[in-house]
Amino acid sequence: MALIALEDVQFFSYHGFYEEEQILGGEFIIDLYVETQIMRAARLDDLADTVNYETLYFICQSEMKKTRSLIETVAQSIVDRIETLFDSVRGVKIRLRKLNPPMGGRVGSAFVEIETGSFRKR
């Protein structure tokens, strides 16, 4: 097994429960970890036999473009698409952070973290 990851992926998006968040938008950061089998890809040096991190980025980008009330919804949608697209995935871990959430005070970030498959066993 191997870990394929993207860290500190930054997006400006329009997610939030409050109307002004969906109008003004905000900064978000994604850390994404995918556990998968890479033996065949490594032996054959073939991108088609692994989880392409560029594809992972495009999945994140696509889901971040869809305005949602909850970051939980965005994170789960990303996980669902990854697990549907790649048969070799054994687990996904995602942390989606909303920077400077409007809380009435100074808060660096709020986040949701989802772990599936092999990550749940750790």
Image: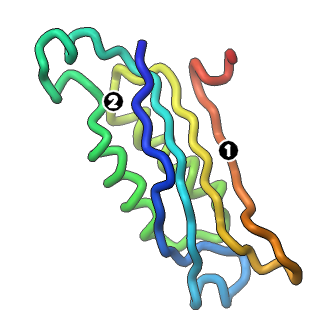
Residue tagged 2: 86
Mark 2 and mark 1 residues within 8 Å of each other at the beta carbon: no
Q: Nearer the viewer, mark 2 or mark 1?
A: 1
Q: Earlier in the sequence, mark 2 or mark 1?
A: 2
Disc 1 residue type (three-letter) = Glu
Q: CA distance from mark 2 to mark 1?
A: 20 Å
Question: Is 28 drawn above or below residue 111 in the view shown?
Answer: below
Question: Is 15 drawn above or below residue 59 in the view shown?
Answer: below
Question: Is 3 drawn above or below residue 97 in the view shown?
Answer: above
Q: Residue at x 52, y 32 (%)?
A: 92
Question: Is 32 drawn above or below residue 28 in the view shown?
Answer: above
SS at mark 1 in the image: strand
Tell me where residue 65 sits by quadrant. bottom left
Where's residue 24, x and y in %?
Answer: 58, 89
Tell me where residue 63 sits by quadrant. bottom left
Task: Compare residues 16 and 44 and report the one nearer the observer.
Answer: 44
Residue tagged 1: 113
Disc 2 residue type (three-letter) = Phe
